[in-house]
Amino acid sequence: MRNTQQIVKKYLYNSMPSYADHSVRVAEYMLRMQEILVGNGDLRFKAWQPDVLWLAGAFHDIGKIFVPRELLEKNVALTEDEWAQMRAHTTLSAGFLHKKVRDVSESSQYDEALEACIHTAMFHHERMDGSGYPNGASGEDIPLIARLCAVSDVYDALTADRPYRKAVSVECAAQKLLEQAGITLDASIVEPVFGNEANLARLSVA
Ligand SMILES: [Fe+2]
């Protein structure tokens, strides 16, 4: 695990500091949601060791190192061709991880970490109703860890400033997520986590 954390630093922090901060927050939210969901008795979320879950979150957007920086930083609408390049970060991430995590992971945790990282990177933009990318997968065809990452990713997108819009409050973000529960996002994650106000303070990574 130590080696894979060094990869996160090397490839993310050195080349894309703002995405590195986003990726680490996504990883932290995933850990906090895991804690809340397991505490609620949903044992499906015990499937991953916390350090594996953290890596999967930290690496979820790693393929963006292959997307032209001007696209990542663009603050006006992307053209269709630019969107296609942006959407490719999912498959690029999976390919990159396949090579890098395999090269450095300690053997005992290799399979678990690699599978978690690749599933998360590949599927975190898929949506429950099939409206996502890269494959338009839906419902339980989307790996659970990627559904968890999707919620975390959207939550951070809403609560952190982006070049094209300001952050919203955690209460407003929770409301927006609840509106998407069972449509684009997994209701079995969103409702127990964001339907209980006491959890919002537990999610804070400030
Ligand atoms: Fe992404």
Image (cartoon, rainbow, N blue to C red):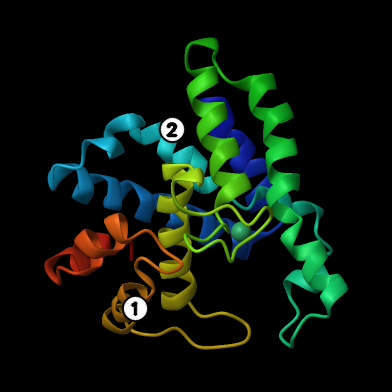
Image vertical order of residue 62 relative to residue 80, above or below: above
Image vertical order of residue 98 relative to residue 73, above or below: above
Q: How many marks?
A: 2
Mark 2 or 1, closer to the camera: 1
- Given residues 144 and 118, the one toward you in this image is 144
Q: Secondary structure at mark 1?
A: helix
Which residue is pictured at 51% across the width and 27% down the height?
Answer: 113
Q: Residue furthest top?
A: 107
- Given residues 140 and 122, the one toward you in this image is 140
Q: Residues within 10 Å of mark 2 (few under 14, many from 20)?
A: many
Residues under labels 2 and 1: Cα distance? 30 Å
Which residue is pictured at 71% across the width and 85% down the height?
Answer: 75
Left or right, residue 25 beside residue 103: left
The amino acid type, in three-letter code, at marker 1 is Glu
Q: Residues within 10 Å of mark 1 (few under 14, many from 20)?
A: some
Query: Which residue position holds label 1?
Result: 179
Going from the N terminus, do you reach mark 2 or mark 1 first?
Answer: 2
Query: Which residue position holds label 2?
Result: 52
Which residue is pictured at 60% across the width and 37% down the height?
Answer: 118
Image vertical order of residue 49 relative to residue 12, above or below: above
Q: Which quadrant would residue 103 be assigned to in this image? A: top right
**In the rendering, at what x and y percent does residue 198 appear?**
12, 67
The amino acid type, in three-letter code, at marker 2 is Val
